[in-house]
Image: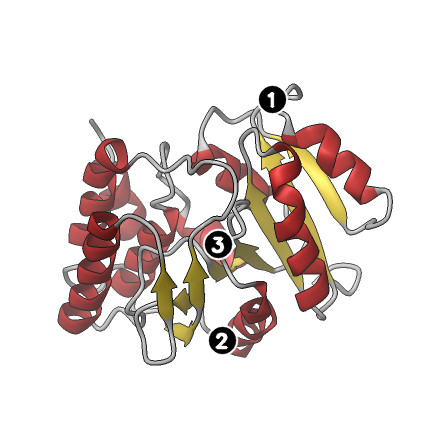
Amino acid sequence: MTDGLRASIVIPAYNEGEDIVPGLDRIFEAVHLESEVLVVVDTPTDTTVPVVERYAESQPRLKILINDYGRGPAYAIRYGIDHATSETVVVTMADGCDDPRQIDDLVRLVERGVVVAAASRYMPGGQQVGGPRFKSFLSRTAGITLNLFTNAGTRDATNSFKAYNAEFVRQVGINSQDGFEIGLELTAKARRLRQPVAEIPTIWLDRAFGQSNFKLAKWLPKYFRWYRFAFGKQLTVEELRALADKNTTP
């Protein structure tokens, strides 16, 4: 931990403008642990920037970061994790769909020793309200079957709303380059290393404002790669990194 911070909350954003404000309001109302909030965008001209800068005048824990790794949510998340101050990093979305009341409990799970703590829509007590039905079906099926067949530690591996041990992320690296599949990637890597993963229930509500930036057809093959990656024998970190690099080679 640095400067007493127990969590770095990373939020990838793309032209959210004023739509990001309700989600930020809920985060600062719900999170009681000492934390920083990092909103990551791809360009200085993103409409999210002036809104966050204005919001930060009353919330010094809030920062806007300009990602220079590459365009898209995967690079934004990677950039945010790399620039996080705390040893526990929480990734949550800018659309307000995630329930920030789980953030403190996710952080505490990581502090207790899990490397990935998942907010789960598909365990008892969890729920998904709204959203495309086919996308929900695929996500639920992937999460439940992955846990059933590999004992992955969560029934919602595809959910981006997760907390991570930052040292674990540094060890295994992030290979995703396109979408929001990082949550599944890091869950799969934890499984192959036989590192502990845990989950708590959450209720996900479809966004009531703005438009989703999720591109199912484009990103589905990426998710399937990491789904398959979770199956197999235990690996060392060196073996895992080599296999992950091969797994993401076009």
Element assignment for label 3: loop
In the picture, residue 158 is in which quadrant?
bottom left
The mark that comes first in sequence, 1 or 2, is 1
Name the residue type under label 3: Cys
In the picture, residue 155 is in which quadrant?
bottom left
Query: Which residue sits furthest top?
Result: 45
Name the residue type under label 2: Gly
Mark 1 to mark 2: distance in Å? 36 Å
| Quadrant of image for the N terminus | bottom right
Residue tagged 3: 97
Relative horizontal placement of residue 134, taking residue 205 as reference (left or right): left
Relative horizontal placement of residue 37, taking residue 211 as reference (left or right): right
Mark 1 to mark 3: distance in Å? 24 Å
The mark that comes first in sequence, 2 or 3, is 3
Q: Residues within 10 Å of mark 3 (few under 14, many from 20)?
A: many
Residue tagged 2: 113
